[in-house]
Structure formats: structure tokens, C-alpha cells
Image (tube, rainbow, N blue to C red):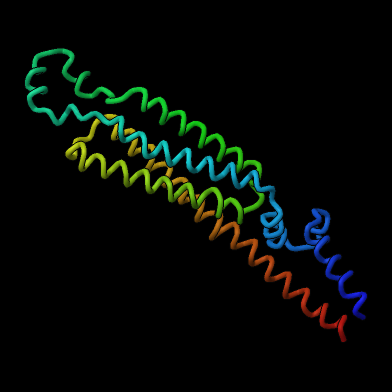
Amino acid sequence: MNSRTPSRANSVTVSASSPASIAGHTRYIEMLLEVDHMPWVYNIIASVAHWVLLAGYLVIPGTFTSLQKSENLEQALIGNGANKAVLNKIQNPPLLAIACVFFAVGTTLLTWLCWTWRSNYIWLVGRVFMPAAMNAAAGLATTLINVYTAQSATWSIMALVTTVMVGSAFLVSLSLTVLYKYVLLKKVEEEHEMEMRTRTPTSTDNHS
């Protein structure tokens, strides 16, 4: 009896870590096992993508123009055709370029991860959609705070564009989180529970 116990434990461990054994489980269990044995590099890439996007959210408010706050400058430019162009200019173009690169890199990485692991709802919710929504919310809050403090509630063109862009990212990420967690994943969980109920009588009969 004692000599057979370790071999059984070893077989369970091997079968759980073997991709071929996943086919015998429900889809929900398959997702859990897939997350548990997923290569760590994908989690690292997801974290890097979120940090890059968050950096973009925090950097771009620094590009908002602050020239609108200067009444003397505005009076000096009255009657000059360059008035609107100067007052609506970007404060720091290189910083804007860096923010755009951050957005492009982060969005590309997350899109690739979503396509690669599109069948694993658990990982997508926990590692992609929910962190993306939280980071976008932080970026939106940073933008609004910058406008109503540093810019004295003056909405420049860049501030409007950034608010729309970051707000859209937040709504999309939040919508995907709700869709995958409370609709798609919920359906998989219900299928898992139903299958477990159908398997329980069979296993009981076998033991009897």
C-alpha cells in the first residue's frame, strides 16, 4: 500500500502539468491549468505593456499648453494672425512624441497578448483588461487634475484630445472586463458546474 501511494501522486502531478491531460477536463478547468502552467514571459510582457501605457498616461499631461493663462500675452497678440496658433500650441513636442511611442508600444503588446490568449478568459481579465482599465482611470484622473490645477481649468486642444483618448481607453477596457468576466466567463463557469453535476452520479455509482 505504501509503495503505491507515491507513484499515484507522481502520476497526478505529471498529468496535471501535461498539456495532453487538459483535454479531459472542462473548459473552465482547462483555463485554470493553462494559467497555472503558462510561460512566465507572457506575464512579464503584460506587465511591461501596462507600465508603458501608464507612463504614456502620466507623461502626456505635460504637453498641455499653459500659455492661455497669460492674459498679458493674450492682449499682446490681439490683432495678430498668429494668436490662435500660439495659444493652442503644444507645450513640449518631444514629450508628446515620447508619449505617442509609449501608447503605440503598449497597445501593440496588449493587442498581441489578447490575440495569443483569446481563448483564456481568466488570464485576459486578470492580466490584460482589468489592469488596462485601472491604468486608464489613473490616466484620466491625472489629466483632469492637470487641467483644473496646473492649467486653471483651461481646456487646450491637447487636453481635449487626451481626455477623449484616455476616456475611450478606459471605457473599452472596462467594457471588455465586464463582458469577459460577467458574460463569457460566467457562461463557462455554469457549463463547468453543470458538467460536474452530471459526473457526480456516475462517480458515485462506480464507487458503489
Residue displayed at 65% across by 44% down: 41
Please state, as top left, top right, bottom left or bottom right, where the C terminus lies in the image.
bottom right
Residue displayed at 81% across by 56% down: 18
Q: Position of residue 98 (x, y in %)?
A: 42, 28
Report the front residue among 81 and 97: 97
| Above/below status of 2 relative to 154 | below
Q: Position of residue 73 (x, y in %)?
A: 11, 22
Q: Is residue 118 left or right of residue 57?
A: right
Residue displayed at 71% across by 62% down: 29
Please state, as top left, top right, bottom left or bottom right, where the N terminus lies in the image.
bottom right
Report the front residue among 17 and 198: 17
Q: Quadrant of residue 15?
A: bottom right
* Number of numbered callouts drawn: 0
Q: Quadrant of residue 2?
A: bottom right
Q: Position of residue 170 (x, y in %)?
A: 42, 46
Q: Looking at the image, which residue sits at the far top?
A: 81
| Above/below status of 203 relative to 192 | below
Q: Is residue 5 left or right of residue 192?
A: right
| Above/below status of 162 relative to 207 | above
Q: Is residue 44 left or right of residue 102?
A: right
Residue displayed at 78% across by 57% down: 17
Q: Quadrant of residue 69?
A: top left
Q: Looking at the image, which residue sits at the far bottom?
A: 208
Q: Position of residue 53 (x, y in %)?
A: 46, 39
Q: Looking at the image, which residue sits at the far front?
A: 3
